[in-house]
Structures are given as structure tokens and as C-alpha cells.
Image: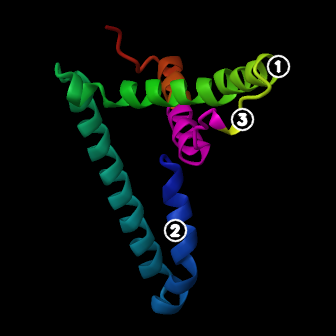
Amino acid sequence: MAIPFIGAILDVIKGPLDKLIPDKNKRMAFEHEIATAAMRAGFAQMEINKVEAAHKSLFVAGWRPFVGWVCGLGLAYAAIIEPIMRFVVKVYFPDVPIDEIPKVGTDILMPTLMGMLGLGGLRTYEKKLGLARER
């Protein structure tokens, strides 16, 4: 299938469909309609994304870069800056409590960042196919 989640949707509803629609041909036609509707929705979202990306306003076209920078800075703080700060405080200021150094909650940060990196992989795939536009 062209869009990966369509197969997952069909796998989830396949069991109940066998019971609800016993006729194999009608069931296959219904599965086809579901897959077609999901693909149409995906194509509609792609068109919306194209319009958003082409917009001149930073508030419309800039939300993805903003989220990327926020996630990148959060990861840099959590993985690099905070451990260095803890080391410096422990070595040079032993009487300062280590709990005074703020921590970043990576429970929200990491899934968002991983999702964006996954989208970056799709972007690389687009470029490989020659579908990427140049600015």
C-alpha cells in the first residue's frame, strides 16, 4: 500500500469485518473503499502542507522549523549542557546542591523530536526520487 497506516487500519478491522460482512466480494469492496478514502485524506493533507509551506508568513510556514529548533535546543540542553553543568557544579562548587540545576522533561521532547526526524527521513526519500523543490 502507498501509505503505511492503511494496512494497519485494515488489519485492525479485518476481524470484525469477517463477522459483519460474510460475503468475500462485498468485504473486499468495503476494504477497498476504506483504503481509497484514507488515501484521499492523505493526498488532501499533502495539498494543505504544500499551501502552508509556500506561505510567506512565518506563523504559517514557520511552525515546523520552530518545533525543530525547540526540540533541538531541548535535546542539546538535556544531553550536553545539563550534564556539563552538573559536572562543573560537582567539581568546582561542591557545596551547591546539584538539584538546583533545572532538568528538561524529555518525556514530551523525545517523541516529538523522533517524529520530526522521521519526517526528515521522508524528505530525504522525496529528494532521492527528485520530487523535492529547490528554493
Identified at 45% across, 17% down, the residue is 130
What's the residue type where badge 3 is placed? Pro
- Density class for disc 2 (Cα within 10 Å; few <14, some 14-19, many ≥20) is some
- Density class for disc 1 (Cα within 10 Å; few <14, some 14-19, many ≥20) is few
- Density class for disc 3 (Cα within 10 Å; few <14, some 14-19, many ≥20) is few
Could you say which disc has been placed on residue 1 in the image? none
What secondary structure is the magenta-colored segment mainly?
Answer: helix
Could you say which disc has been placed on residue 10 in the image? 2
Q: Element at badge 2?
A: helix
Mark pair 1, 3: CA separation = 12 Å
Identified at 64% across, 31% down, the residue is 78
Of mark 1 and mark 2, the one earlier in the sequence is: 2
In this view of the protein, which residue sits in the foreground, 70 or 22? Answer: 70
Identified at 38% across, 24% down, the residue is 65
State whether residue 18 is above or below residue 14: below
| Residue 63 percent location from the top left of the image | 32, 31
Q: Which residue is mark 3?
A: 97
In this view of the protein, which residue sits in the foreground, 102 or 52? Answer: 102
Magenta range is 100-119
Of mark 2 and mark 3, the one earlier in the sequence is: 2
| Residue 92 percent location from the top left of the image | 78, 16
What's the residue type where badge 2 is placed? Leu
State whether residue 36 is above or below residue 100: below
Q: Which residue is mark 1?
A: 91
Identified at 31% across, 39% down, the residue is 46
Q: Is residue 13 left or right of residue 83?
A: left
Nearer the camera: disc 2 or disc 3? 3
